[in-house]
Image (cartoon, rainbow, N blue to C red):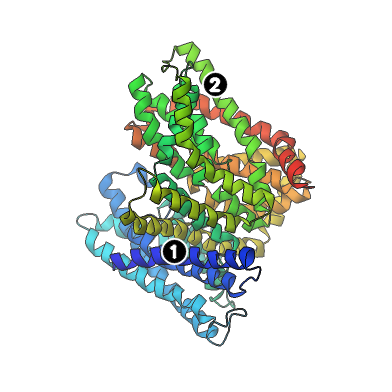
Amino acid sequence: MTRGLERATALLVAAQAVVVGIQVVGRHVLRNPFPWTEEVARLLLVWLMCVGGVRALQLVEHPRVTALVRLLSEPRRAAVEQGMRLVLLAFLVCLLVPAWRLTVASTSERLPASGLSGALVSAILPLSLLLMMVVLVQQIRGAGFGGTLAWSLGAAGLALASVLVPLLSGVAPLVVLVIGFVVTAGLGLPLAFTLALTSLTYLVGLGGVSLTILPIKILGGVDSFVLLAIPLFILAGALMESGGISERIVGLATAAVGWVKGGLAMVAVFAEILFSGISGSTAADVSAISSLLIPSMKRAGYSGAESVSIVASASAMGILVPPCLTMVVLGSLVNISIVTLFLAGFIPAFLLAAALVALIAWRARRQNWPTAARASGAELLHAAKRALVPLGLPILLFGGIFSGATTVTEAALLAVVYALVVGLVARPGIARGDLVRILAQTGVVTAMTLWVLGAASAFAWILARERVPDAFGEWVTALGGGSAVFFALTIVLFVVVGALLEGLPALLIFGPILFPISRELGVDPVHYGIVIIASMGIAFFLPPVGVGLSIACSIAGVEMDGVIRTYLPYLAALLVGLALIAAFPVLTLILPRVLLGYAG
């Protein structure tokens, strides 16, 4: 089953790339687009979510809140995880029935362009739920209970009670939703399933509503051609990284600025600007840069805490450098041009980078940090030549997107083709045997994102139905202070809650609530979106719960408790930069206005 899931996931990613490629050829070469390609590509995306979601569950990689369970001892943490498997198994059984009903109802429908049965879209969901049940049963049997049965049953009972007791007590459905979400998420149930479980409980408590709404919303939340850019960007970044891209970029940055006081620390900032424009993923950024730079920094005399703080803060800034997967999701979520968001992120990213470089220069002089030997002109030229091929990818991406020659999805496909060719011919390059692994891992990361997106679309629909945005807007208006107070609330919300929910779920839950309010206050949506994305980047590294900071600490082999104090000045620099971005919209909007004629 494991090998089959891995190959199926890899095959779906490859098939998506091929279908998008056919669309590109039809549109740009034959000048005769194939109308079925978009429909089939979206169908494959739904299948990838379901099949890759099973594989992600098998690998225990679905994102979850871990801040509370990390406080427990190892045996009790394992017991709570076992209890959450029991809860998840019960939920999947409940979701299976409406998912199957939706499939049966879809058999008479036909997709308009391809003529395929509508059941092909929905049938994969009940099949994947059955496979998830098999995986959970295997995990439950494999882990066992030992002497922790009481803890496992207690955790499962608390999670179920958080949704069932309010439901049976007849309280308002929205209260059921909130209580269930807080408790189950806090206990470590994967966030996608937390959102779906509490949404299902809400629908049951509401009464008189067909439960097939939930699978409809889950599948509908990912049925978008724009979202095809997500697996393609992830795949392009993975292919380039396998071809040794990060080492070449770090080499160029080291040759350029490594010789100044604190230069090796500045290398992290400059390398992040270059690398994040290729990877598209903050987790990939911090993993690659940490692996390359932290050992070198420690050997040069930087403390482990200082090394982690520098790399983490640089990676937090990198989320603003396109291509950014969060920008793709945000654009799809609130109907903002992704191209405009990409362009709007550059100057804010450079502002945060400048704040970090200024802080590094000050600390370097104050603490007499080490310097590297100055690179000769020949060495700098050699490093530039080695980095030339990797840096061709962002040039290709931005040239195609900003010129209007390609859509974001088509540009992502061109990036895949470029990365594949470079990876196969470069030395060292991608081993041909690694392609299946790279494709499968791309599918798993994509599926996790899509599951959160699909479940959050159902959750957001419920919040809209309960008029939560209206109530929140009235509360903000009552506070007074206009857009300034609203921006402050937004930053606090996304930095703190985004750290707990690991970013994307916070965006999917609160984005539909906050964007309508921002428009009422006269805030430009692109400017507001960039502020949110910058806040999410900081949240990913917010101590002590930030996942990105945990990754950097793990690679450096240091405890987070010893890093927090050192990291605080870097966190302050990021927050000051974020405040400037929020206060001065021109920093965000000048490039879209000049280059795209954006009028707001």
Q: Residues within 10 Å of mark 2 (few under 14, many from 20)?
A: some
Which residue is under mark 1?
14
Residue at x 41% of width, y 67% of height: 51
Q: Which mark is residue 228?
A: none
Q: Earlier in the sequence, mark 2 or mark 1?
A: 1
Above or below residue 463? Residue 102 is below
- Looking at the picture, tell me which residue is in the foreground, 355 or 439: 439
Q: Position of residue 376 (x, y in %)?
A: 45, 19
- Looking at the picture, tell me which residue is in the foreground, 209 or 354: 354
Residue at x 71% of width, y 38% of height: 485
Q: Horizontally, is 583 left or right of 259 in the view?
A: right
Q: What secondary structure is found at the residue carrying circle 1?
A: helix
Which residue is under mark 2?
359
Q: Horizontally, is 362 left or right of 153 in the view?
A: right
The image quarter in which residue 321 lies: top right
- Looking at the picture, tell me which residue is in the foreground, 33 or 117: 33
Residue at x 44% of width, y 48% of height: 422
In this rendering, the count of numbered labels is: 2
Question: CA separation, marks 2 and 1?
Answer: 44 Å
The image quarter in which residue 229 lies: bottom right
Q: Position of residue 591 (x, y in %)?
A: 72, 40
Q: Position of residue 138 (x, y in %)?
A: 26, 66
Residue type indicated by callout 2? Leu
Above or below residue 65? Residue 480 is above
Q: Position of residue 324 (x, y in %)?
A: 56, 47
- Looking at the picture, tell me which residue is in the foreground, 254 or 369: 254
Quadrant housing the N terminus: bottom left
Residue type indicated by callout 1? Ala
Which callout, 2 or 1, points to the residue nearer the camera? 1
